[in-house]
């Protein structure tokens, strides 16, 4: 039984040392966890907005200035039929019969001359005159 007692003592020693190692490991984990679970202080940050706002305001002012320049220099689009600068002969003859000669035509005189035509015909004649630049 002496051998059995020694074996039992050795096994108890091994178990005790294993328990000590486990206990040390648990204590280390507990210490690490308590260090991590401490209170976090309020974190705050400030952003320099003054400089960025000034940059954006400068860019906006520059863009508005460029837009104003573009609007000032913008050319109005020409009429779609700007290639034709002459009035058809039939329109010229009709205007001459009503006492309107070549050159800029007064709108009131034109309306009086076109009174006998249908709405579509009046629109067509006025469109031709606008295309030729003959309406004042």
Image: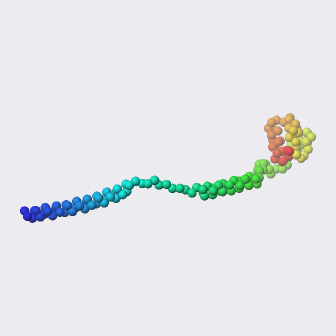
Q: Is residue 82 left or right of residue 14?
A: right
Query: Along the line of sight, which residue is nearer the eye, 22 or 84?
Result: 22
Query: Along the line of sight, which residue is nearer the eye, 98 or 60?
Result: 60
Query: Along the line of sight, which residue is nearer the eye, 16 or 110?
Result: 16
Q: Please tell me whether residue 126 is drawn above or below residue 43 in the rendered image.
A: above
Q: Is residue 22 left or right of residue 89?
A: left
- How many numbered marks appear? 0
Q: Please tell me whether residue 121 is drawn above or below residue 83 in the rendered image.
A: above
Q: Please tell me whether residue 4 is drawn above or below residue 77 in the rendered image.
A: below
**Residue 134 seen from this side:** yes
Q: Is residue 19 left or right of residue 109?
A: left
Residue 79 screen position, x and y as percent: 78, 48
**Res. 121 image quadrant:** top right
Q: Residue at x 57, y 57 (%)?
A: 48
Q: Quadrant of the N terminus?
A: bottom left
**Residue 90 seen from this side:** no
Residue 117 screen position, x and y as percent: 84, 36
**Color style of the picture:** rainbow
**Res. 127 image quadrant:** top right
Query: Along the line of sight, which residue is nearer the eye, 76 or 4?
Result: 4
Residue 88 screen position, x and y as percent: 85, 46
Q: Residue at x 77, y 48 (%)?
A: 80
Q: Residue at x 84, y 45 (%)?
A: 129
Q: Quadrant of the C terminus?
A: top right
Q: Is residue 102 left or right of residue 83?
A: right
Q: Residue at x 86, y 35 (%)?
A: 115
């Amino acid at each position: 039984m002496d051998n059995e007692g020694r074996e039992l003592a050795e096994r108890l020693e091994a178990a005790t040392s294993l328990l000590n190692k486990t206990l040390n490991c648990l204590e280390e984990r507990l210490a690490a966890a308590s260090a991590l679970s401490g209170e976090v202080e309020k974190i705050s940050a400030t952003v320099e907005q003054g400089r960025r706002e000034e940059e954006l305001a400068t860019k906006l002012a520059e863009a508005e200035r460029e837009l104003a320049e573009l609007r000032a220099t913008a050319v109005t689009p020409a009429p779609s039929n700007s290639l034709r600068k002459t009035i058809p002969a039939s329109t010229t003859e009709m205007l001459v019969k009503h006492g309107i000669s070549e050159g800029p035509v007064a709108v009131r005189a034109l309306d009086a001359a076109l009174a006998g035509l249908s709405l579509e015909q009046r629109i067509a004649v006025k469109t031709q005159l606008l295309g030729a630049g003959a309406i004042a």
